[in-house]
Amino acid sequence: MSKIHDIPWAWLLLLPVLGGLSVGLILHYFSGEDRNGSVSDVIEGATLNNGRVSLKFGLVSTLVSLVTLTTGGSTGREGPVVHLAAVISTWISNFMNVEDISARDLLGCAVAAAVSASFNAPIAGTLFALEVILRHFAIHAFAPIAIASVAGTIIGRFFYGNVTER
Amino acid sequence: MFWTVAFAVGLVGGFAAVLFRFSVSSLQEVFYQTDEMYFIKLMKLH
């Protein structure tokens, strides 16, 4: 707590204001939708858009969440991570020209890995991707998503160690 | 083949999540000289 007391009060007051202003300007000029993306956009991409999300909108949403989180705003951390994973999966699906079931499974893989790496929870990451994003438990999705989730956990533990909360 | 791709996607997705977490912590350190995890640890101690 002592570190916070060393910071000038004007800075503590000004920083969230500047953060909010930046978020507003970024959303207005770059997102194209005047709102931030969320997990629901990823679910929509999985259901209606062949396992893909808008790359530009996803990156802008991640940037906006980063600014919000670092300037004292109140927002969750799992939403932007899920969206960022969906952007990566979309890019890979486009690169490999993957369609339909495979593209949706890849989206689930990326989301599961991101959640498991963020929270050191591979089982939760797998279930989240299957139940929330894909909304089915088909075996063709379960195996690759479980593998991706383990891969994400390996990366998370490599950098942050085997801790359950970060 | 697809499982290998899934594993690679998992590595990339996990790395992106770690990078996002690291970016948040680093910027909070720059702006506030601490990060929110420090406060969570304090709350757990008290």
Image (cartoon, grey):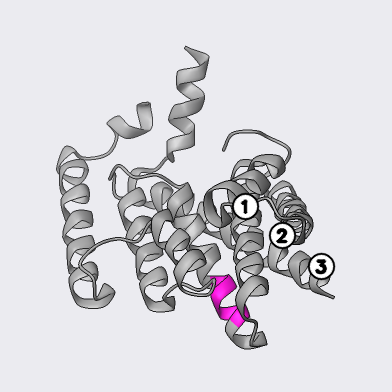
The first of marks 2 and 1 along the sequence is 1
Please state which amino acid type lies under the numbered disc 2: Ala
- Say which of marks 2 and 3 sits in front: 2
Give the overall secondary structure of the magenta segment: helix
- Say which of marks 3 and 1 sits in front: 1
Residue A163 on image: x %, y %? 68, 34
Instruction: Please tell me which residue lies in front, B6 or A99.
Output: A99
Which numbered dot is residue A136?
1
Q: Secondary structure at mark 2?
A: helix
Q: CA distance from mark 2 to mark 1?
A: 8 Å
Report if the CB atoms under discs 3 and 1 are less than 8 Å apart: no
Residue A30 on image: x %, y %? 26, 76
Q: Marks 2 and 1: same chain?
A: yes
Residue lying at 79% horizontally and 56% vertically, measured from the top left: A143
Q: CA distance from mark 3 to mark 1?
A: 19 Å
Please state which amino acid type lies under the numbered disc 3: Trp
Label 2 marks a residue whose chain is A
Which numbered dot is residue B7?
none
Label 1 marks a residue whose chain is A
Instruction: Please tell me which residue lies in front, B3 or A61.
Output: B3
| Label 2: few (<14), some (14–19) or many (≥20) C-alpha neighbours in 10 Å | many
Quadrant location of residue A38? bottom left
Q: Is residue B40 left or right of residue A118?
A: left
Q: Marks 2 and 3: same chain?
A: no
Please state which amino acid type lies under the numbered disc 1: His
- Say which of marks 2 and 1 sits in front: 1
Label 3 marks a residue whose chain is B
The stretch in magenta equals A88-93
Quadrant location of residue B11? bottom right
Residue named by callout 2: A141
